[in-house]
């Protein structure tokens, strides 16, 4: 293993093309600083400047190029991404360096993995210049840094293969954990609907009327020796991050509890971040230990009205709404009054408990995968450290083929007997867990849950039916029943309605869709049921209400159709000289008559 200056083993290191980018997403895409924010080339974070010719062809990225951030916040300075995208031209833009390796000496992906090591990051700090809002380093300083190079060129490929495999497993574990979170969100929406829109019509009450809500304090740092490094957990908003809290970064003393507004909260208390930088406001966490908090957290105490896991996920699914309630000048904040006045849905406690049982089983799976992820990250760190010190046995590692069949120069074999790099380290199986597999693992009976949902909703549905009948009488009476024109020949929407048709449950959006797709077509309530399908059954009553609203606004007309699809005065009933149908689904259709209101 020898050391070489970066300037000696890269053919070129340069900044990108200086192009004024446009809001219009057209032409050849251009890299931006945020393009490599997650350490990969993110095709969703590219810029455009309406470039439609080859005027910047010299700046097109090529396979094996390494992009490096050299102007950024100090935390993200030196971030790199490896370019291996095929069949697409991308222009290398300003504020990212492009490093092109001399492939007769340096395998590009080997260099890429070295640039990601803590050791290289520490070397970058020595050449970094800091300003108020950002940090940077220049190319000449970067050229002076060195990189360890194995004497055997193929060993560079082998090291890249080992680290790439470990990195792939880490990415798969993270995706699996993310899938488990998405699974819980899907289960919550299936069982309870969107808690903000409340499509299922649950009773809603103010949170402050259902439970106690408290907060905490920040003991004075001037008395740090008296108030801190104690035995009591103390939560800051940075730790309120969508998960369970078992321990805290800082701990406070008995004296801090006695002399400040800090108080201890029991496990199952839901914490809500009332203010904080960036996206912090509105985040929630669930205490799994006794802890106090700072004044930026609202502590929502356990209550007989809520299963803690249900309330935790209810607030997770209310994040955007809660953030929108923030008040203030330069930094919008929530406060205890706003949190207490917030209306939450209140489903049957038995249904909440069924959901909580799914949560507990799923969280147990997450713990297993998080433990596996930690092992993999430790493995990666160990492999990386040993690899760049030349301490790995690489003799059994297959050689990764270089792009464009570039094999590199021939070099004498050098045997390094430091042991198998994977010895004693059990690598988890590859592959992601599917939603169906999650269902099996948590052992949950989905049909039982669906029956519980229906049973819980039954009283609400009965109330809705009773009130809906009155609405029908009121609305139909406003409609003209003379001069009814034939409907035969108009195209029906039957079995062509899409769940997206009423997805947002917003009458303005629906009007726009009607205007573009459904004018002069007709549909029935049966079609609505078909459209929303089983998964969206809870939306049916909401859709009926929207239809009645559209009737009021004379966007739709209600007609009755005979078996030949001709309009006719089907069986009418009368109450106080008002028209009433016997059956909402019996021959009753709706036609778009006005989409320009």
Image (cartoon, rainbow, N blue to C red):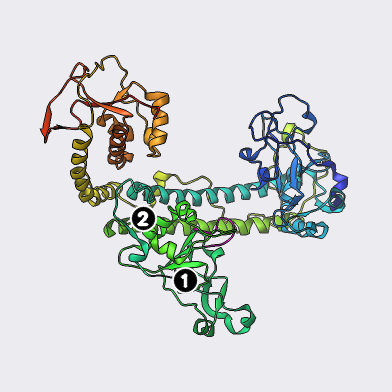
Q: Which secondary structure class fits the magenta region best?
A: loop
Residue 140 left/right relative to 162: right
Task: Give the camera-side residue of 294 and 485.
Answer: 485
Element at badge 1?
A: loop
Residue farthest toward the top in the current orientation of the protein = 489
Secondary structure state at the residue bearing disc 2: helix
Q: Residues within 10 Å of mark 1 (few under 14, many from 20)?
A: many
Vertical position of residue 455 compared to residue 562: above or below:
below
Give the distance between the C-alpha atoms of the residues marked 2 and 1, in whole angstroms.
Answer: 30 Å
Position of 420 with respect to 538 (left or right) is right
The total number of labels drawn is 2
Of the residues tagged 2 and 1, which is closer to the observer?
1
Residue 287 visible (yes or no): no
Query: What residue is at 37 percent from the left and 53 percent from the top?
Result: 442
Q: Is residue 543 visible?
A: yes
Q: Residues within 10 Å of mark 2 (few under 14, many from 20)?
A: many
Residue bounds of the magenta highlight: 275-282
Q: Which residue is mark 1?
A: 215
Tell me which residue sits at (19%, 25%) in the image: 587
Q: Which residue is mark 2?
A: 358
- Residue 500 point in image, percent of width and height: 40, 34
Which of the 4 quarters of the picture holds residue 14?
top right
Q: Residue at x 45, y 52 (%)?
A: 321
Above or below residue 568? Residue 29 is below
Relative image position of residue 502 (x, y in whole percent): 37, 35
- At a point 11% along the width and 36% down the height, the residue shown is 576
Q: Earlier in the sequence, mark 2 or mark 1?
A: 1
In this picture, residue 280 sits left or right of residue 126? left
Q: Is residue 31 left or right of residue 414?
A: left
Q: Residue 297: x, y in percent?
A: 49, 67
Q: Is residue 344 magenta?
A: no
């Amino acid at each position: 293993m020898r050391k070489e200056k970066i300037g000696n083993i890269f053919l070129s290191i340069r900044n990108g093309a200086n192009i004024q980018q446009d809001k219009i997403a057209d032409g050849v895409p251009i890299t931006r600083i945020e393009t490599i924010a997650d350490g990969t080339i993110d095709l969703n974070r590219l810029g455009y400047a309406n470039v439609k010719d080859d005027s910047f062809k010299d700046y097109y990225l090529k396979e094996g190029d390494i992009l490096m951030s050299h102007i950024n916040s100090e935390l993200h300075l030196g971030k790199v991404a490896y370019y291996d995208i095929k069949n697409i031209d991308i222009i290398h833009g300003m504020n990212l360096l492009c490093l092109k390796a001399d492939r007769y000496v340096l395998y590009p992906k080997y260099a890429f993995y070295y640039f990601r090591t803590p050791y290289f990051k520490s070397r970058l700090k020595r050449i970094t210049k800091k300003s108020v809002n950002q940090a940077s380093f220049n190319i000449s300083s970067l050229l002076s840094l060195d990189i360890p190079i194995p004497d055997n060129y193929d060993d560079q490929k082998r090291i890249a293969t080992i680290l790439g495999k470990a990195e792939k497993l880490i990415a798969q574990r993270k995706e699996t954990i993310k899938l488990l979170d998405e699974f819980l969100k899907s289960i919550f929406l299936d069982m309870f609907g969107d808690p903000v829109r409340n499509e299922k019509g649950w009773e809603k009450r103010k949170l402050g009327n259902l439970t106690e809500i408290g907060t905490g304090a920040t003991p004075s740092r001037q008395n740090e020796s008296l108030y801190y490094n104690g035995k009591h957990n103390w939560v800051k908003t940075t730790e309120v991050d969508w998960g369970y809290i078992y321990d805290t970064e800082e701990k406070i003393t008995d004296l801090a509890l006695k002399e400040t507004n800090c108080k201890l909260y029991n496990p199952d208390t839901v914490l809500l971040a009332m203010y904080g930088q960036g996206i912090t406001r509105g985040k929630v966490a669930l205490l799994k230990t006794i802890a106090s908090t700072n004044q930026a957290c609202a502590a929502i105490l356990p209550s007989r009205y809520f299963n803690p896991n249900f309330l935790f996920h209810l607030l997770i699914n209310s994040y955007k709404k809660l953030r929108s309630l923030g008040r203030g000048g330069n930094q919008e904040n929530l406060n205890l009054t706003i949190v207490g006045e917030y209306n939450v849905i209140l489903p049957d406690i038995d249904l909440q408990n069924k959901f909580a049982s799914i949560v507990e089983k799923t969280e147990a799976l997450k713990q297993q995968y998080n433990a596996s992820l930690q092992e993999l990250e430790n493995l990666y760190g160990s492999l990386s450290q040993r690899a760049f010190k030349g301490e790995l046995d690489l003799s059994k590692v297959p050689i990764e083929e270089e792009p464009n069949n570039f094999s590199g120069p021939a070099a004498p074999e050098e045997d390094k007997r430091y042991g198998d790099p994977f010895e004693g380290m059990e690598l988890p199986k590859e592959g992601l867990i599917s939603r169906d597999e999650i269902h099996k693992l948590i052992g949950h009976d989905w049909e039982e849950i669906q029956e519980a949902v229906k049973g819980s909703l039954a009283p609400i549905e009965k109330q809705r039916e009773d009130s809906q009948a009155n609405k029908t009488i009121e609305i139909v009476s406003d409609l003209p029943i003379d001069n009814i024109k034939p409907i035969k020949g108009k195209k029906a929407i039957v079995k062509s309605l899409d769940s997206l048709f009423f997805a947002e449950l917003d009458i303005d959006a629906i009007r726009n869709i009607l205007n573009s797709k459904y004018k002069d077509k007709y549909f029935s309530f049966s079609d609505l049921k078909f459209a929303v399908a089983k998964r969206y059954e809870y939306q049916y009553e909401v859709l009926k209400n929207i239809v009645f609203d559209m009737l009021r606004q004379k966007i739709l007309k209600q007609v009755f159709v005979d078996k030949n699809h001709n309009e006719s005065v089907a069986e009418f009933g009368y109450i106080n000289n008002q028209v009433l149908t016997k059956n909402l689904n019996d021959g009753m259709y709706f036609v778009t008559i006005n989409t320009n209101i």
